Image (cartoon, rainbow, N blue to C red):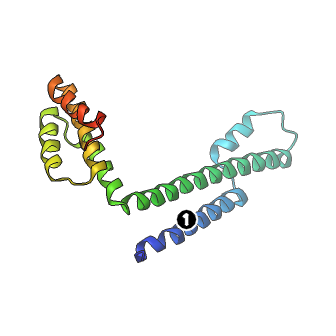
Amino acid sequence: MTDWKTRLIPLFLVLACCGIVGMTYTNVFADGHRDDDEHEHEEDEHWEDDEEWEEEWHMEEAMFEIEMMRMHFELFAGLFDMVRDTHEVTSDAELTAIMAVTGVEDLIHEPEDRAEFLEGELEHVENAAVRRTIRGMLAETYAELEDTESATKHLSVLIRGGN
């Protein structure tokens, strides 16, 4: 059963999209001009009259707002995909552990500390896929430390199909 927060995410996205549509509609059909648009109009002498300029300006503004709305929808679609994918990944303990192992390098910058941490975790982990991921990360870390013997030890286990 999903928790109530997870079930509210689609509702939040729908409300956000409605807000975007409402803002776009308001901006497209709002009266008044921006100061910079009026200034451009004063400098541009090829307009026959204010109605022609107003119509052209209104169409340009509408197209701009519609493009912005499209970009916002793409952003929210990407956000929704990210939330869905994160939920799927974190629902799988093995996949979450593998992601954590691959992120160790971002958290533990010193290769010596990273190797020590991963060696310690390798002793306690029972899942074969997670152990193989740790060994791969250890091989990379030992290569970074120029410890060829330790790197090849872990690579050899991986190549032979061990964990």
User: Type of residue at label 1?
Assistant: Ala
Q: Tell me what residue is drawn at x 29 percent, y 53 percent.
A: 97
Residue situated in front as seen by the camera: 49 or 13: 13
Q: Is residue 141 above or below residue 1?
A: above
> In which image quadrant can residue 118 be found?
top left
Tag 1's secondary structure? helix
Residue situated in front as seen by the camera: 117 or 149: 149
Provide residue 113's location: percent of width, then percent of height. Answer: 12, 38
Packing grade of label 1 (10 A; few <14, some 14-19, many >=20) is: some
Q: Quadrant of the C terminus?
A: top left
Q: Tell me what residue is drawn at x 16 percent, y 49 percent.
A: 121
Q: Tell me what residue is drawn at x 59 percent, y 65 percent.
A: 19
Q: Evaluate whether residue 100 shows in this view.
A: no
**Residue position marked by numbered label 1 in the rendering:** 16
Residue situated in front as seen by the camera: 64 or 88: 88
Provide residue 13's location: percent of width, then percent of height. Answer: 54, 65
How many marks the image carries: the answer is 1
Residue 58 shown left or right of residue 134 in the figure: right
Provide residue 43's location: percent of width, then percent of height. Answer: 73, 33
Residue situated in front as seen by the camera: 35 or 86: 86
Residue 55 shown left or right of residue 136 in the figure: right
Residue 54 shown left or right of residue 67 in the figure: right
